[in-house]
């Protein structure tokens, strides 16, 4: 008797060559799918490289083109869930979050116009890669598998729906409801009737996902350059650009974590390694960015501890990557990844030291500051004294050495000085500089 080669069950109503022909047709469709999307991905990646270089060359021009408006406070409208999700590809951030700056981050419309003009070609690439991801999310084998499952369910429903419902109810009482358990139970049910879960090609989907992340990283670097170019005179505007940068940071991190999760589930070790490396490198970039732009205007002890903890997390991630590399045979790829790990670990040490020393001046630096400022007191009658703002930044008061006017700290923007010989709260005498001898 003829039996199924997969499940060894008896075959009835055999159509002798039907299954073989359908398999060959499906294989042919899959080969065409691979060839077409491979060439399409390469073309789009090459085009993205050209656009990225052009934007990098024009990076300084965006600051010149930004029109700094007289600031008007505008309430940031609440974002609905529908606005956040991309309807065709909900796992990636929709393009409008990078265009509608006034709506999402309260950045003035004049800035929004200059920004959109600067990154228009990059966002067009973003849309193209989103479409590629949508097209490759369901390759031929996946569509055939879904059709078989649908057909099986329909057949079972027609034959014995009452029994099927009863089985589902009884299974819910004692079986695990996790996604992995549900997937396993579905696969076992399908194997009983000879339908085996196919190995679905996720390579193009994941490669497209990586390019989506690369585009977001370019956007982040552009936003960083804008933030660096804004002075304390435009404090409110800078805060809103920082909101945009925070959104980009969270988006990039969540996308890389999702790539790693998808690659791990589908046993794409190479993509999993690359996702973890990209995440570690970007974490280093973010920590450097936050050291330059601390939320409170200065590096607090709590922030230092958080940065140190993040450095430890990055080191653990690098160790995880090395463990994955041991299971791979690609020597050239392993060497390149190990080189990247060494660079990441070096960056981590630099960030750790920078966090330790941030806000602290050496003896030589303090003497240099004292020498430079003492020259300003020459010829001024009376005395002068050294003070520090609420965040510990040093400043001087000439003449009688007491507060007669208010100003803002050039380092953090906090209020310094006072009135009627009384200093505002948080400002106090810096005895170390006062007692310093040249």
Image (cartoon, grey):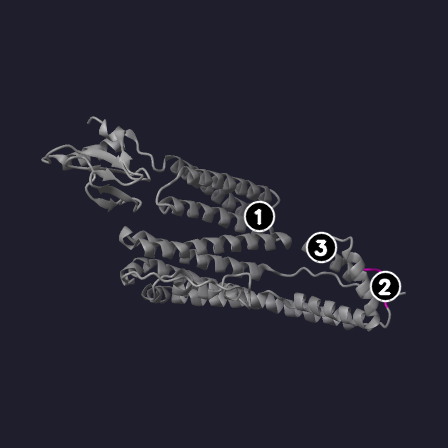
Q: Does 190 appear above or below 318?
A: below
**Quick check: 407 left or right of 182?**
left
Which x, y percent locates residue 150? Answer: 73, 69
* Magenta stretch, residue numbers: 4-11
Q: Does 200 appear above or below 401?
A: below
- Residue 342 visible in rendering: no
Residue 254 forms part of the magenta stretch: no
Task: Please give the residue where the numbered disc 1 appears in the rendered image.
Answer: 330
Q: Does 115 appear above or below 297?
A: below
- Residue 318 visible in rendering: yes
Q: Quadrant of residue 219?
A: bottom left
Pointer 1 with pointer 3, Cβ within 8 A = no
Q: Identify the residue shown where x is 18% and y is 35%.
A: 401
Q: Secondary structure at mark 3?
A: loop
Q: Secondary structure at mark 2?
A: loop
Mark whose residue sits in front, 1 or 3? 3
Ranked by sequence position, the earlier of labels 2 and 3 is 2
Query: What is the crowding at mark 3: few (fewer than 14 residues within 10 Å), some, or many (at least 20)?
Result: few
Task: Please name whichever residue, 177 or 79, is drawn nearer the observer in this view of the structure.
Answer: 79
Query: What is the crowding at mark 1: few (fewer than 14 residues within 10 Å), some, or many (at least 20)?
Result: few
Which x, y percent locates residue 244? Answer: 41, 57
Mark 1 → mark 3, Cα distance in angstroms:
38 Å
Q: Main secondary structure of the magenta part?
A: loop
Circle number at residue 3 = 2
Which x, y percent locates residue 31? Answer: 62, 67
Q: Secondary structure at mark 1?
A: loop
């Amino acid at each position: 008797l003829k039996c199924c080669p997969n499940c060894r069950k008896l075959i009835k109503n055999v159509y002798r060559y039907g299954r073989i022909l359908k398999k060959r047709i499906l294989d042919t469709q899959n080969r065409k799918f691979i060839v077409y999307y491979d060439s399409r991905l390469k073309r789009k990646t090459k085009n993205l490289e050209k656009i990225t270089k052009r934007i990098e060359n024009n990076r300084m021009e965006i600051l010149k083109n930004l029109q700094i408006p007289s600031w008007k406070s505008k309430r940031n409208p609440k974002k609905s869930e529908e606005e956040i999700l991309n309807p065709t590809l909900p796992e990636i951030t929709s393009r409008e979050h990078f265009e509608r700056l006034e709506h999402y981050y309260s950045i003035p419309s004049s800035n929004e116009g200059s920004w959109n003009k600067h990154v228009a070609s990059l966002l067009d690439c973003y849309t193209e890669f989103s479409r590629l991801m949508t097209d490759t999310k369901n390759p031929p084998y996946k569509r055939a598998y879904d059709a078989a499952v649908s057909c099986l369910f329909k057949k079972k429903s027609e034959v014995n729906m009452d029994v099927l419902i009863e089985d589902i109810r009884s299974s819910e009482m004692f079986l695990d409801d996790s996604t992995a358990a549900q997937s396993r139970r579905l696969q076992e049910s399908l194997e009983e009737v000879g339908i085996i879960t196919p190995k679905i090609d996720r390579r193009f989907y994941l490669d497209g996902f990586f390019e989506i992340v690369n585009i977001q990283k370019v956007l982040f670097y552009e936003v960083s350059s804008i933030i660096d170019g804004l002075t304390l005179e435009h404090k409110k505007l800078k805060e809103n650009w920082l909101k945009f940068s925070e959104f980009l940071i969270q988006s990039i991190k969540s996308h890389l974590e999702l790539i790693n999760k998808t690659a791990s589930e589908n046993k794409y070790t190479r993509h999993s390694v690359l996702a973890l490396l990209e995440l570690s490198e970007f974490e280093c970039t973010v920590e450097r960015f936050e050291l330059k732009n601390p939320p409170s205007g200065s590096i607090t002890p709590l922030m230092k501890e958080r940065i140190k903890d993040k450095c430890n997390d990055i080191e653990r991630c690098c160790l995880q990557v090395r463990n994955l590399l041991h299971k791979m045979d690609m020597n050239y790829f392993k060497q390149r990844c190990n080189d990247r790990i060494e660079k990441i670990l070096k960056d981590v040490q630099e960030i750790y030291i920078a966090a330790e020393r941030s806000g602290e001046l050496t003896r030589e630096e303090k003497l240099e500051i004292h020498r430079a400022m003492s020259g300003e007191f020459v010829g001024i009658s009376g005395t002068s004294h050294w003070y520090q703002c609420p965040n510990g930044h040093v400043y001087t008061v000439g003449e009688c050495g007491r507060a007669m006017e208010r100003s803002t700290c050039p380092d953090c923007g906090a209020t310094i000085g006072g009135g009627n010989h009384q200093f505002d709260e948080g400002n106090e005498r810096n005895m170390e500089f006062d007692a310093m001898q040249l």
